[in-house]
Amino acid sequence: MASRIEDYALLSDLHTGALIGRDGSIDWLCFPRFDSPAVFTALLGTADHGRWLMAPTHAEAAVSHRSYRGSSFVLETLWETPEGSARITDFMPVGDRRASIVRRIEGLGGSIEFGQVITVRPGYGKVLPWVRRVTETDGTEAIVAVAGPDALVLRGDKLPHAVGRQHSGSFTVRAGERVEQELTWYPSHRPVPTAIDIELALEQTCAYWEAWAARYNQDGKYADLVERSLLVLRALTHEDTGGIVAAPTTSLPEDFGGARNWDYRFCWLRDAALTLEAMLTHGYADEALKWRDWLLRAVAGDPEDLQIMYGLSGERDLAEAELTHLPGYEGALPVRIGNGAVGQYQADVVGEVLVALEKLRLAGGHEDHFSWPLQQAMLGFIEKHLAAKDHGIWEMRGDLLHFTHSRVMMWAAFDCAVRAVRNHGLAGPVERWEEIREQLHAEIMEHGFNKELNTFTQTYGGTATDASLLVIPQVGFVPYGSPEMLGTVAALEKELVDEHGLILRYQTATGLDGLAPGEHPFLACSFWLVEQYAHTGRRADAFALMDTLVGLANDVGLLSEEYDMVQGRMAGNFPQAFSHLALVRAADALHGTENLSLSDEPIDTNTMPIAILQS
């Protein structure tokens, strides 16, 4: 059985990511990209579906402590037994575009016997590779596994031996001794790549992460968590294309044992837009520009072909399929690859993109011959579909409806367009855009706000609420402290906030999403609630909820999509970009209020200075 979600740590080389448990087992790894088929899939099945375990042979008697080295994704795990102590350093080399993972064991005191088991299973655990032991030109041995287009080579000290359909073995590490191994993926039609200098690769990898993190200089109560969250966002961003995956995993369940299991290894326009804002706010201008370039490439073409998500390089075909050979994480079925929501119409997406690109303009970014015409084309797309119903931000698989949040984000798109012309001198039919903006505003207030209940509603004419309504003041539709928003927050607290202060996305029991009911509080939405509290003078509530939320991060600062407060465990894909993005926003909202008295006016983080881009 796989470990609990919170027991995993992420390794990243900016092309893909691995999950390694506290037990020393790498249970998830896709080579060479985040969206490639996994070669270790024990996370969604059993050990026979592929993993790489490296731990003391008497692990039940060992005590482990782990942490990232500084501001990196180099993981160090300290193992202590009555006989001795040792440190394992796990990392993925960054910068050389080499798809590999390195494990180094160093004896610190006494001696420890380590056991290792490696089971390579390409094709999400389905393919049994042809494995052979080879002698290299320098006389050392290596283990090579080949299956179709994939090949992997394992090099290093104390290599395991074939035992049935896996390789296993044990070795003893004494004080001052070191054992190193590297597993490298390569296309099977190419020669076996040469070995790397592990010490140099480690130095370069640490140097990269430390240099990247050094550009972050904010202080405050949550500064360390914001830094780690920004690092997570970088770790999930492809080095070459600039596309950011929502998470490096697929099918970790939102409801244990249920069917809410989705593939998040793709680039949602919404997530990428929010990442741009976060990077801009914290001085990462280059990353913001790279995302914009990814966006322009991904959505180029007929606006009618606009999708809510794309592949890392802008791929459009993300067809959903089920992997029936896998039993799922703790039995949660089906296991899915691809995502059927790719074909959905979500009316909010253009608004998310245009809001982010406006932030880029305000930071000094210049529109070019490609970027502004593309935005105009996207505006034309939503104008053409102005009356159309959609699936909403939560990718409902039920009936199409007019979701209030979607309509507000359409309003925001035209609001940004109007300012682009009025304030930045760009060309466009501003009078028509102003007319559509006012039309949408009036429509939303008439159909999306229930005067009797004094709250915005999930859908036009409905009575239920939805946590996405917390986004309404973030884009300036109404102020945070307006009577309409204060009434909406009161309704959300009554309907969706649990006894721990965390908020659900919506009531799944209504069947509106076309799925069986059941999920846990959504962490990003709970961070939105922190932001709302911070902007309306409820600082005590904001800090209390923020402290609860950051306390849900695991020992290395990672967050999942949801959290089961009853069982005290993470749920959903992991680590989740959306959760870390929302953490950054919430911390920013609180940062300016830390030294204010309770009687002071709350600070609007939308007015906080943004790093100026170099043209």
Image (spheres, grey):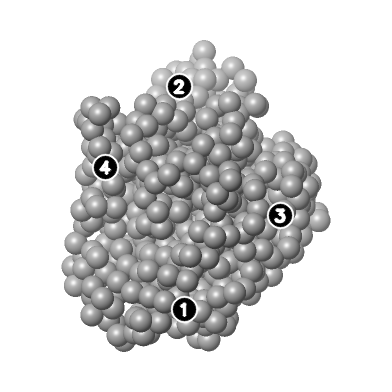
Please say if the residues under marks 4 and 3 sit with CB atoms less than 8 Å apart.
Answer: no
User: Outermost residue, right direction?
Assistant: 324
Please say if the residues under marks 2 and 4 sit with CB atoms less than 8 Å apart.
Answer: no
The amino acid type, in three-letter code, at marker 1 is: Met
Foreground label between 2 and 3: 3
Spot occupied by residue 26 in the image (x, y as percentages of width and height) = 58, 43
Give the mark nearest the N terminus, 2 or 3: 2
Give the mark nearest the N terminus, 1 or 3: 1
Q: Is residue 509 visible?
A: yes
Comparing 28 with 581, the one in front is 581
- Residue 132 vs residue 259: left or right? left
**Quarter of the picture holding the C terminus:** bottom left
Spot occupied by residue 253 in the image (x, y as percentages of width and height) = 68, 45
Q: Is residue 168 visible?
A: no
Comparing 213 with 81, the one in front is 213
The amino acid type, in three-letter code, at marker 4 is: Ile
Q: Residue at label 4?
A: 603
Mark 4 is surrounded, within 10 Å at the Cα level, by few (under 14), some (14 to 19) or many (20 or more) other residues, namely: some
Q: Residue at label 3?
A: 513
In the figure, 612 relative to 75: above or below? below
Q: Residue at label 1?
A: 378
Classify mark 3: helix, strand or loop.
loop
User: Outermost residue, top direction?
Assistant: 82
Q: Residue at label 2?
A: 85
Foreground label between 2 and 4: 4
Residue at left offset 65%, top offset 27%: 567
